[in-house]
Image (cartoon, grey):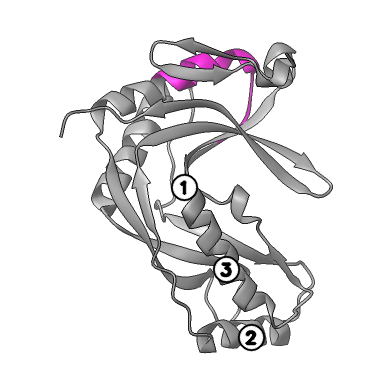
Amino acid sequence: MPKSCFPYHSQGFIISTGDTILNNQQIRCFIAIELPDEVKAGLHQLQAELKLSGHTFVKWVAPESVHITLKFLGNIAPEKVASITKVIEQAGKTFSPFQLETGEVGAFPNLKQPRVLWLSIRGELDKLIALQQHIDDGLTQLQFAKETREFTPHLTLARLRQGTSPRERREFGELVMKTPIEANYKINVDSISLMKSQLLPSGAVYSRLSQVKLTAET
């Protein structure tokens, strides 16, 4: 069996012992909530509607790679995977599953001059924010700095390429605002994942290193 698909179980969570875990190279990681397949299918349909304009300066994010980021960790040593997962496991014991749903389309910094196109998140945001803060606090014991920016949960749909002119950005933003978009997809949050990000010429490829279930009593 290839090393990259041989998992082992430990204290209620699963860690995938991929090739990058077994050698001594650092791993680019983040903590996230993965999306169910039906939500990814909905994002694919939404992107298909917006792609009809044929704008070549828009780089669309593959729906299979879309997630709700809770904490970006940067490059970490492989031996830290287990201790990070234990921090996530403590959060799993503290929180029970909760419900989110997608909202309206927006952009950073705004739809008049968009750089990043996203879908907002609504629902039980108080629980989502508390979960993110719990993980952020727990990681300080592993010398990860706390977040200084406000947590803004969203799903990234696309990024406009560098060199896109202000006129092109404005026209694309106007197109998004004029497009009737129905994107009310349900997200049942019942687990947290530690993800690896591998940067390739074709774009980032994500794979799960470990996953923890939310198991607290309601």
| Residue found at x 70% / y 21% | 4
Report crowding for label 2: few under 14, some 14 to 19, many 20 or more residues within 10 A (C-alpha).
Answer: some
Q: Are marks 2 and 1 in contact (CB under 8 Å)?
A: no
**Dot placed on the residue nearer the N-terminal end, 3 or 2:** 3
Residue type for callout 3: Gln
Distance from Cα at disc 3 to Cα at disc 2: 23 Å
Q: Nearer the viewer, residue 203 or 71?
A: 203
Circle 2 sits on which residue? Answer: 170
In the rendered image, residue 24, in percent from the top left (x then y), is placed at 74, 13
| Residue found at x 22% / y 28% | 216
Report if residue 99 is visible in the image: yes
Judged from this view, the residue extending furthest toward the left is 218
Q: Are marks 3 and 1 in contact (CB under 8 Å)?
A: no
Q: Secondary structure at mark 1?
A: loop
Circle 3 sits on which residue? Answer: 45
Circle 1 sits on which residue? Answer: 36
In the rendered image, residue 217, in percent from the top left (x then y), is placed at 17, 29
